[in-house]
Amino acid sequence: MKRLFFSWSGLLARFRARVRSHDPLQSDPRRKDLRSLEGRLGHRFRRIRVLERALTHRSFAHEAGTPGQHYESLEFLGDSVLELVISETLYLANPDRPEGDLSKTRSFLVSKSELANLSGRLGLGRHLRLSHNEEKTGGRGRKAILADAFESVIAAIYLDGGLEAARSFILNQFRDHLKQDARDELELGNYKSRLQERLHVLGGREPNYKVIRETGPQHSKTFLIEVRGLNRVLARAPGTSKKRAEQKAARLALAELDLLQNAIRSGATPRRSRG
């Protein structure tokens, strides 16, 4: 019996070795590269082709003569899975928070800008399959494409491993955002409307926001926003998105208006505008 067992073990080992030697992933450089991506995604695919499709742009499928074999339908599914997981997480963490606040936070978290940043952090851009023309025109670093690819990868994980696998991936990617960015967004959420109301009370027009500078790579930019009101520059502030920079600038502008009004009340000369 022992001899038979060892004989069977040897046959099984040789069979597995033979299967591995015929595994297309061992001879296909691109798919071996996708296996390296799995480590960053935290999911080992049973069907690697679904991940391959999640990274295939429409332009590549058209150029390759395989219409329909691209990520757009996966993007649709991934968007729904992402919204479900983020909505569930925000609700469970803040069951008594008003619906409007939860919706606003979710919208910020799943914005194209944020998804593109996450996609860039994972390095999805270098794994994309793009047409020659799309490659030449910078598609690999385009925010819209990176954001779409991120949603498509969510769908691929969901289809390959189920909802729990997708949830695990999403929460791992959004961990820092859920702790910090969502909190900041809720805190900053009313500054723009408060600034507009304050300027109206002071007899001024609506505040004007302008991008002064953009820095960083295409998938991870930082914006410097200037806000003007009462014929002067009220504040400037940076942010990882235009929306966040505007909110921060509005908060600083409110503080600037407080200083101006206090100076007027005390008879002091208001400081000159910076712009």
Image (spheres, grey):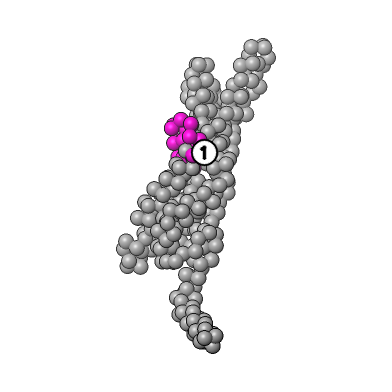
**Magenta stretch contains residue 98:** yes
Quadrant hosting residue 121: bottom right
The quadrant of the picture occupied by the C terminus is: top right
Q: Is residue 83 left or right of residue 93?
A: left
Between 21 and 161, the residue placed more toward the observer is: 161
Quadrant hosting residue 270: top right
Q: Amino acid at mark 1?
A: Ala
> In the rendered image of this protein, does residue 153 appear above or below residue 80?
below
**Magenta stretch contains residue 272:** no
Residue 210 seen by the camera: no
Q: Secondary structure at mark 1?
A: helix
> In the rendered image of this protein, does residue 139 appear above or below residue 197?
below
- Relative image position of residue 152 (x, y in whole percent): 42, 55
Q: How many marks?
A: 1
Picture residue at 48% right of the left edge, 34% below the top: 95
Picture residue at 53% right of the left edge, 59% below the top: 42
Q: Residue furthest front?
A: 1
Picture residue at 45% right of the left edge, 42% below the top: 88
**In the rendered image, which residue does mark 1 sit on?**
93
User: Circle 1: is it few (<14), some (14-19), or many (20+) Cα within 10 Å?
Assistant: few
- Relative image position of residue 123 (x, y in whole percent): 53, 58
Most common SS among magenta residues: helix
Between 52 and 59, the residue placed more toward the observer is: 52
Between 45 and 16, the residue placed more toward the observer is: 16
- Relative image position of residue 131 (x, y in whole percent): 40, 63
- Relative image position of residue 192 (x, y in whole percent): 51, 28
Residue range (magenta)? 92-109
